[in-house]
Image (spheres, grey):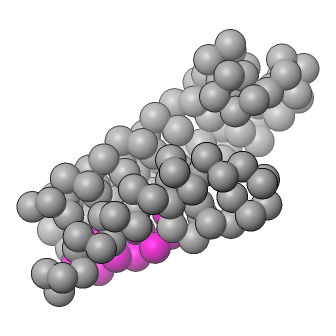
Amino acid sequence: MLANLLIGLVALIHLYILYLETAAWDTPKGWAAFGLTPEFARATKTLAANQGLYNGFLAAGLLWGIFAPSFEFKVFFLLCVIVAGLYGAATTRKTKILYIQTAPASLAMAALLPGW
């Protein structure tokens, strides 16, 4: 039960990231969330929307794992989120990615594995 709640939280986080990257990227909300200038946001809007779709796919996989229910889907998509968070933190040098993305997914994985 706890694992599914945490997985749901991770899915909601990624749905919100989907929104930020596809709908709000070139707005003050998107600029603030990602530390962008308006010029950079306009120039990279299409790239961000593509990136946002991937976050949406992560959320969809996690939700599928909850509602299917599929242990394998949960593990696979949590690992995808963890790896993406680690890579993002390493390549952008923004440690907040670890707290926003990697930590919740790692907690969900820790809650999921004892029931395996």
Looking at the picture, how far across and down is residue 3, in whole percent? 20, 64
Query: Picture quarter containing residue 58?
Result: bottom left
In this view, the residue farthest toward the top is 28
* 11 w.r.t. 73: above or below: above
Toward the viewer: 84 or 111? 111
Q: Residue at x 68, y 22 (%)?
A: 32
- For the N terminus, give its image quadrant: bottom left
From this viewpoint, is residue 73 visible?
no
User: The C terminus is located in which quarter?
Assistant: bottom left
Give the magenta range. Answer: 71-81
Magenta run includes residue 96: no
Q: Nearer the viewer, residue 5 or 51?
A: 5
Q: Is 37 drawn above or below residue 102 in the view shown? A: above
Give x and y (percent) for residue 108.
30, 64
Residue 91 visible? The answer is yes
Above or below residue 14? Residue 90 is: below
Q: Residue furthest bottom?
A: 116
Across and down, in percent, residue 46 comes to 76, 35
Is 76 magenta? The answer is yes
**Image coords of residue 52 (percent x, y):** 59, 42
User: Which residue occupies 78% across, 54% down?
Assistant: 93
Q: How would you classify the magenta stretch by its main secondary structure? A: helix
Q: Is residue 38 left or right of residue 96?
A: right
